Amino acid sequence: MPSNTQIVDGFMQAWNSLDLDAIMDYFTEDAAYANVPMGPPNVGKAAIRAFIEGFLGSTSAINFVVHHQVEGADGVVMNERTDKLVMDGRTVELPVMGVFEFSGDKISAWRDYFDMGGFA
């Protein structure tokens, strides 16, 4: 079984490939995904998929560049990264801190912390 760090690495690659089905395969059915500054989390695979599908609809390229990543004794993975996005023809580079919780080999909770000013 892969480590949680390896799971997050694969998850980042799925995003970089803009592969919605591959991204969704990483989540538990009851997972919660929160872009913390944007409001309450999306809960459940259907809600997460709808949010990500909408996001990918305006995004033509993604490169999640992980600078630091740690896995705690409890299996939680945290990474500091720069999300480089091309959205509606405009490039955005967003510093992000991500937190990933797991149930087995699936992500059960994902929270991203960032400054919304990066989208201004």
Image: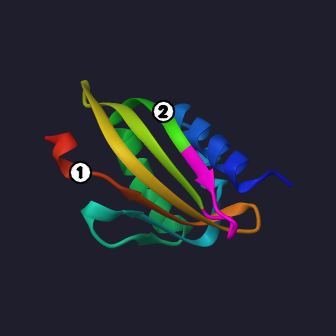
Answer few, some or many: residues within 10 Å of disc 2's Cα (few below 14, many 20 plus, some between 14 and 19). Answer: some
- The residue beneath circle 1 is 115
**Among numbered discs 1 and 2, the one appearing first in the sequence:** 2
Q: Where residue 53 sits in the image (x, y, percent)? A: 43, 49
Tell me if 88 is positioned left or right of 6 in this view. Answer: left
Q: State the residue lying farthest toward the left.
A: 120
Amino acid beneath label 1: Asp
Q: Which mark is residue 105?
A: none
Q: Is residue 80 above or below residue 24?
A: above
Which of the 4 quarters of the picture holds residue 9? top right
Q: Which mark is residue 65?
A: 2
Q: State the residue lying farthest toward the right.
A: 1
Q: Is residue 74 above or below residue 18?
A: below
Q: Main secondary structure of the magenta part?
A: loop
Q: Secondary structure at mark 2?
A: strand
Tell me if 106 is positioned left or right of 53 in this view. Answer: right
**Does 71 appear in magenta?**
yes
Q: Where residue 81 sits in the image (x, y, percent)? A: 44, 40
Name the residue at 27% across, 32% down.
92
Which of the 4 quarters of the picture holds residue 56? top left
Amino acid beneath label 2: Val
Query: In this orientation, does residue 47 appear?
Result: yes
Whether pointer 1 and pointer 2 mark residues with C-beta atoms closer than 8 Å, the reply is no
Magenta segment boundaries in residue numbering:
69-76
Name the residue at 25% across, 24% down.
89
Query: In this orientation, does residue 20 appear?
Result: no
Name the residue at 40% across, 57% down.
112
Q: Where residue 2 sits in the image (x, y, percent)? A: 81, 51
Q: Which quadrant, please, contains the C terminus?
A: top left
Disc 1 and disc 2: Cα gap in Å?
A: 17 Å
How many numbered marks appear? 2
